[in-house]
Image (spheres, rainbow, N blue to C red):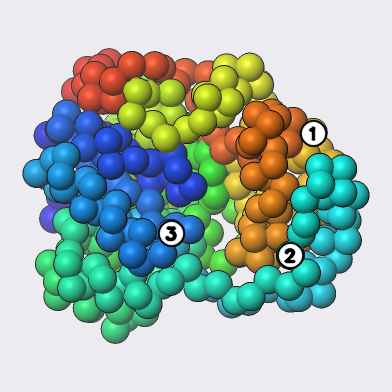
Amino acid sequence: MGLGLAVGVVAAPMAGGGSTPELVAAVGGAGGLGFLAAGYRTAAGMAEQIRATRALTDRPFGMNLFVPGPAADPAVVAAYRERLLPEARRWGVELPERVAEDRDDWEAKLAALVADPVAYVSYTFGLPSAAEAAQVRAAGTVQVGTVTSAAEAVAAAGRGMDALTVQGPEAGGHRGTHRAEDEPGSAPLLELLAAVRRVTDLPLIAAGGLADGPGIAAALDAGAEAVQLGTAFLRSDESGASPAHRRALLELGETVVTRAFTGRPARGLRNAFIDRYQPYAPTGYPEVHHLTQPLRAAATRRADLDAMHLWAGTGHRLARTGPAARLTRALWAEAGR
């Protein structure tokens, strides 16, 4: 089963505000496929995003879910809190003394998507249980697993996924490793695509650093049916990225993978916060995410590029301005498709 897209461009789900109903509708209207991000929202907030998107388009679209994992070791989170306290005092914010378990409203979101299905559901940070996947499948939804290795691809295929998003190390934002403690692989996207293709014949969506025609063409030639773009859309008219984040894509140069902000590996623009705290950042997602939230919010209010979490892929300097539909069509044409 193929994805059946007229234009093989997928707008990546960017949790935290980058993805918007307007962006999803624009990319879908251009013949591609847009994904909303349920991460960090309640089930009710997710449903509101779905309603807003349906008001803008009758094209199919998808929803991405974060799969919850085991709780982090409270001791390592507490030690990191102590390390961050001088930063909090400097900016006059309070860090939570204890972070409660957070499953990102997983069960309620699944129930809502079974009761009122969208065309596609993708999973990041793991896979649903066999019973959960069967429920979503019975609702008529196409399921997409995010994988960062051939082993994860085998697991996703075995769980009944209909397609795979193959996320290379060049991708901005969180790496989709199925376990928070895993160090993500370093094999470039094209090599990873070849490794995944050897173990499955499922349709593949290539993700990671893709932002121009030649890069997209190379991924398609390597066996992908479509490409997933996130950073490439951050400067578009419909993006939810802040003005400071848009500016940073051009002003800051290097991207690095860090656990400093969330306790999970994520690629972002290198800044002073990462340099100071990456050596001490523990594995602990989403606990570290919640721990650093007051610091990140204060940095965002100040538009402080030295302290913000600025997720970006390696192709961030290629991100363009303008309407997302025009960008979608242009990139597909530049890829020779």
User: Is the residue under label 3 in contact with that under label 1 (CB below 8 Å)?
Assistant: no
Answer whether residue 194 is visible to the viewer in this image: no
Q: Which mark is residue 272?
A: 1
- Which residue is at the front of the view, 151 or 108? 108
Mark 2 crowd level (few <14, some 14–19, many ≥20, 10 Å Cα): some
- In the picture of the structure, the residue carrying the numbered disc 3 is 41
Give the residue drawn at x 9%, y 44%.
Answer: 58
- Quadrant of the frame with the C terminus: top left
Give the residue drawn at x 47%, y 68%.
Answer: 104
Answer whether residue 113 is visible to the viewer in this image: yes
Give the residue drawn at x 23%, y 25%.
Answer: 325
- In the picture of the structure, the residue carrying the numbered disc 2 is 96
- Which residue is at the front of the view, 124 or 297? 297
Q: Nearer the viewer, mark 2 or mark 1?
A: 2
- What percent of the width, then of the height, locates residue 35? 30, 47
Above or below residue 309? Residue 142 is below
Q: Nearer the viewer, mark 1 or mark 3?
A: 3
Kindly report the distance in space between the C-alpha atoms of the residues bearing marks 2 and 1: 22 Å
Nearest to N terminus: mark 2 or mark 1 = 2
Above or below residue 242? Residue 321 is above
Mark 1 crowd level (few <14, some 14–19, many ≥20, 10 Å Cα): few
- Quadrant of the frame with the N terminus: bottom left
User: Position of 162 compared to 70: left or right?
Assistant: left
- What percent of the width, then of the height, locates residue 15? 45, 49
Give the residue drawn at x 87%, y 49%.
Answer: 89
SS class of the residue under badge 2? Answer: loop
- What percent of the width, then of the height, locates residue 332? 24, 23
Above or below residue 203? Residue 182 is below
SS class of the residue under badge 3? Answer: loop
Give the residue type that dot 3 points to. Answer: Arg
- Corner quadrant of residue 302: top right
User: Position of 149 compared to 64: left or right?
Assistant: right
